[in-house]
Image (cartoon, rainbow, N blue to C red):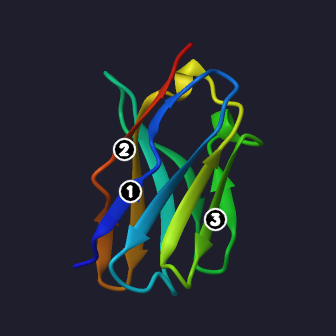
Amino acid sequence: QVQLVESGGGLAQPGGSLRLSCTASESIFNTDGGWYRQAPGKERELVARIINGGTTNYAESVKGRFFISRDFVRDTMFLQMNSLKPEDTAVYYCNLINWRGNYWGQGTQVTVSS
């Protein structure tokens, strides 16, 4: 069972930046990873994914503003969020898929407000 611990959420002003981190309890090599978010009253949606070979894809709403990356030494996945908008407010979840299963972090709140 892989444990995922997220950090980096909080309050940001519109136009500001935050960086989310997701540290795994074991190696993230040979895995696919992603970040999802869920706003109040809405379904969970994909924000960004990075597959084993390093290819990334993003939701249209965050393209050019958010960037997903990984550090295999620290077994950590990141989501750099720039030019934040109020509509980015949500609970953000990291996701990891390996040969054993599909794992989720506990979620971290991101609030964008002036």
Q: Amino acid at mark 1?
A: Glu
Q: Residue at x 38, y 74 (%)?
A: 24
Question: In screen coordinates, is 22 left or right of 17?
Answer: left
Front-most of 40 and 9?
Answer: 9
Q: Earlier in the sequence, mark 2 or mark 3?
A: 3
Between marks 1 and 2, how big is the CA–CA gap? Answer: 6 Å
Q: List x then y, in percent, for residue 107.
A: 33, 47
Secondary structure beneath disc 1?
strand
Q: Outermost residue, top direction?
A: 114
Secondary structure beneath disc 2?
strand
Front-most of 1 and 60?
Answer: 1
Q: Which residue is mark 1?
A: 6
Q: List x then y, in percent, for residue 36.
A: 45, 47
Q: Amino acid at mark 2?
A: Thr
Q: Amino acid at mark 3?
A: Ser
Question: In screen coordinates, is 67 left or right of 92?
Answer: right
Q: Which mark is residue 108?
A: 2
Q: Residue at x 39, y 28 (%)?
A: 39
Quadrant where the N terminus lies? bottom left
Front-most of 79 and 45?
Answer: 79
Question: In screen coordinates, is 111 left or right of 57?
Answer: left
Between marks 2 and 3, how big is the CA–CA gap? Answer: 18 Å
Q: Is residue 70 above or below residue 14?
A: below
Q: Which mark is residue 69?
A: 3
Label 3 crowding class (10 Å Cα cut-off): few <14, some 14-19, many 20+?
A: some
Q: Is residue 77 above or below residue 114?
A: below
Q: Residue at x 31, y 21 (%)?
A: 41
Question: In screen coordinates, is 103 left or right of 55?
Answer: left
Q: Residue at x 50, y 60 (%)?
A: 34
Label 1 crowding class (10 Å Cα cut-off): few <14, some 14-19, many 20+?
A: many
